[in-house]
Image (spheres, rainbow, N blue to C red):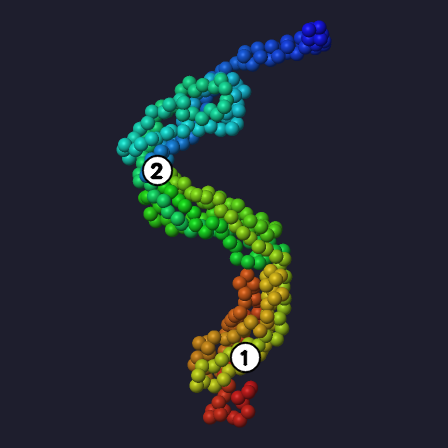
Amino acid sequence: MASLSQALVRNWRLKLSALGLAVFLWALVQSEPTNPETLSSVPIRIQIADTGWTTSGAPTPATVELRLAGPTREIIRLVRDGTSLRVPVATIGSQDTTIALRREWVQLGDRSGLTVESISPATVRLSFEPAQTRLVPLAARLAGDITDRFALASEIEVSPRLVRVRGPASRLGSLDSLTLMAFDLSSVTRSGAFTVAVDTTGLLGSSVVPPLGTLTIQVEDRIERVLDGVSVQAIANPGEAAVVTEPPTIQIRIDGPRTLVTSLDPNRLRAWVPPELLQGMAPGEVRVVPLRIEGVPDLVTAVPSIERIRVRRAIDEAGGAPGEEGR
């Protein structure tokens, strides 16, 4: 018993000071002013229990003004974190209805001491229509270009391929796909998976699951390679005299991701003149025609040293002097 008494009186001045400070702080909190404050543009959220229906548009009005009372610090926290007025709708009795707003629908969270004094306006008008659920393809929307240092090493993959959309039947009836928000390729400096939100513009009253998509982007260092002596083909139509190209070979510069450029087999490339550009050529006639390049892999660019080439129809034996065919 003596030891308990000693413990109580030990450092009694310090303990008394701590008790006094605690009482002072309690009194300070209790005396904190509770001046009313007004919050404008608080959004209205609609929660429909009947899954067969959804809103066909934004509520009217879409926001309300709240008059709150409570500790100033709690009101400041609420303004910082944000709030909303959630309207629960258990059943749909009419496609158009007006609902009186209740103060308990304001989302105050765990903030003690706050009360809602008034809501303005006091009612909200809602329109409903049957809901529809669809699976639609998801696509990327790209902006900008990969920086000159890098090049795409494979096609960009979008995941998931399909998203589930639930919303008003009038809006979803003509919906054939959705896109992600625009993604700036110029920001890519490494390979990886990039999370992008689904663009729900025009889908008011709808929900998308999942609301996010992933872009898988593979990049490599960009390099160039020069291929010399690529033969130019100009094949005459059946029954017509042969044609020759001037020059017979060209140089092609290829550009792209390191792996694809270094592994490219030059024999895959074909530089040629389409036969339809040679139709009707008279013996000895010369034409300047565009050149086509084939066999270039996707994501690789091929630039020939010349884009147009001279072709000459050989002079056949019946119409020309001996030896002129090869000129």
Q: Residue furthest front?
A: 1
Question: Disc 1 residue type?
Answer: Thr
Mark 1 Cα shell of 10 Å, populated few (<14), some (14-19), many (≥20): many
The image position of residue 61, as x and y in percent, is 37, 30
Q: Is residue 84 above or below residue 312?
A: above
Q: Residue at x 64, y 10 (%)?
A: 19
Q: Is residue 85 left or right of residue 224?
A: left
Q: Which mark is residue 203?
A: none
Gap between marks 1 and 2 measured at Cα: 71 Å
Disc 2: CA contacts within 10 A as few (<14), some (14-19) or many (>=20): few
Residue 288 at x, y percent in the picture: 51, 76
Of marks 1 and 2, which one's residue comes earlier in the chain? 2
Q: Measuring 53% from the left and 63% from the top, which residue is drawn there? A: 298
Placement of the C terminus among the 4 image quadrants: bottom right
Question: Eyeballing the image, is 200 above or below 121?
Answer: below
Q: Which residue is mark 1?
A: 245
**Residue 254, x across and y down, in percent:** 59, 66
Task: Give the amino acid type for the residue marked by disc 2 in the picture.
Answer: Thr
User: Residue drawn at (71%, 6%), measured in percent from left and top?
Assistant: 2
Contact (Cβ within 8 Å) of mark 1 with mark 2: no
The answer to whether residue 102 shows anywhere in this view is yes
89 or 225, nearer to the observer? 89
Q: Residue at x 47, y 24 (%)?
A: 108
- Between disc 1 and disc 2, the foreground one is 2
Q: Which residue is mark 2?
A: 51
